[in-house]
Amino acid sequence: MKLLFKRLLKISAAFAVVTLFSVLLCMTAFAQVKTIGVVNDDGVNVRDAASLDSNVVFHLSTGDTVSILDVSGDFYSIAYGGSNNLFINSKYVDIKQIGGIVNGDVVNVRDSASTDGNILGQVTDGELLTITDVAGDWFQIDYNGQVGYVKQEFVTGGITETIKAQAQAQQQAQQQQQAQQAAKASAQPATPVSASLAKQSAPPPAADSAPVMNPVSGQYGVVNTSDGLNLRESPSQGAAILIALPSGAAVDLLATSDQWNEVTYDGTTGYVAAQFLDVKSGTKPVADTSASGGSTADQIIAYAKQFIGTPYVWAGTNLNKGVDCSGFVYSVFKHFGITLNRSSHDQATQGVKVGKANLQEGDLVFFDTDNNGTVSHVGIYIGGGQFIESSSSSKHWGVTISDLNSSYYTSVFITARRILGN
């Protein structure tokens, strides 16, 4: 009996050593998972707890780099200068790189955020990844110097779980909003597409019965409000909004009534308030898509301006709820049927390169805000030395118009690309 007990002790001790070794390996792997952030303002407080009431330990300035360990409410838990257990308000830090660990035996890396994408290679369980962006339920990663994509479900560690939860919450909120809009009675006012559109005078409430629409031919309509116009799925102020038509947009006119017009714009058919549409006879003008950008550039800029004030959200593409810099540009151009790459780095490879002195309205301007020699920020040039962007600066948080020739943007400008007419 004593001999058996001794053998069991030896087996237990050996098992404990193996278990401890496995735990240490796991802890080591997670310790190597780093999320890198860059401070976007001067005099930012670093505190000893995740609270505005906590003690300020020291200050950081624009361009300082920190390692983000975790997320705690509105604060990041960070490591800086060899010290841990430090906290900084998340709005003063731009996330530039996220670390993650592969959580799957063999995981495919694809060249696009789709299971239909070509397989670039594979990563294995426990392998460290550098995440550079988010695309739906995929992570964009740096794969041997190439841009690759892996499913989020196969990546863990660092703050990846927080990102997944945020993305899931945003998706659920969108689904709930769509369900609420579908359930609204026609007499209830719908939420406007943007803060600017909220200023539009609402058309008279819809009658109990659907309005009688009179078919027309040989006529077209032009949006006459500078704030743009909601295109709805039915002739009712409570109907779901399909898209927002930019100011001056020319639409095909299908039918009219006293309060509503049925129109088609870029392949989407819906209804607009009659008072905000000028009805004209003849042939609808065709947008000029020459190298100068013409009316296409004007429409893009007018549409982009509707979302001034939309907050900055890292990896966001929702023009009403939140966008990052490349998500803003991507979504604005997508509205006009122009498909761009998702990240600013990849957008900088599209179109034709143009010099800063030859910029035209609608051109994309790119910057190196990380000071590492690569593109990390993008905006749309709107003329007059200005561009519209989604800024992560605490001074101009969200979609705003900025001065291209300011000392800061002059120092970080890299290149410009012309998309329109190419």
Image (cartoon, rainbow, N blue to C red):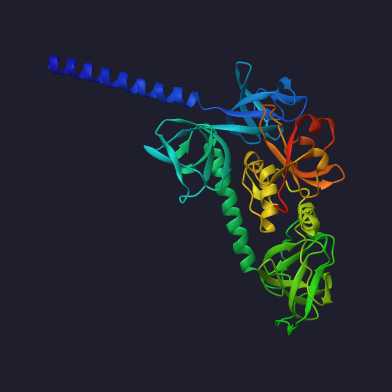
Q: Say which of 258 and 165 sits in front.
A: 258
Which residue is painted at 46% across and 46% down in the image? 118
Quarter holding residue 417: top right
Can residue 217 be seen here? The reply is yes
> Does 292 sit left or right of 92 as displayed?
right
The image shows residue 161, relative to residue 81, as above or below, that is below
In the rendered image, the quadrant that contains the N terminus is top left
Which residue is painted at 51% across and 27% down in the image? 33
Q: Say which of 64 and 195 sits in front.
A: 64
Can residue 322 be seen here? The reply is no
- Residue 246 picture location, percent across and down: 78, 61
> Does 227 sit left or right of 340 as displayed?
right
Image label count: 0
Quarter holding residue 52: top right
The image shows residue 172, relative to residue 181, as above or below, that is above
- Residue 46 picture location, percent across and down: 70, 24
- Residue 234 picture location, percent across and down: 68, 74
Q: Say which of 328 and 417 sits in front.
A: 417
Quarter holding residue 154: top left
Please identify the residue farthest to the right as the structure is shown: 384
Which residue is painted at 57% across and 42% down in the image? 134
> Does 17 sit left or right of 158 as displayed?
left
> Does 278 sit left or right of 121 as displayed?
right
- Residue 123 picture location, percent across and down: 42, 35
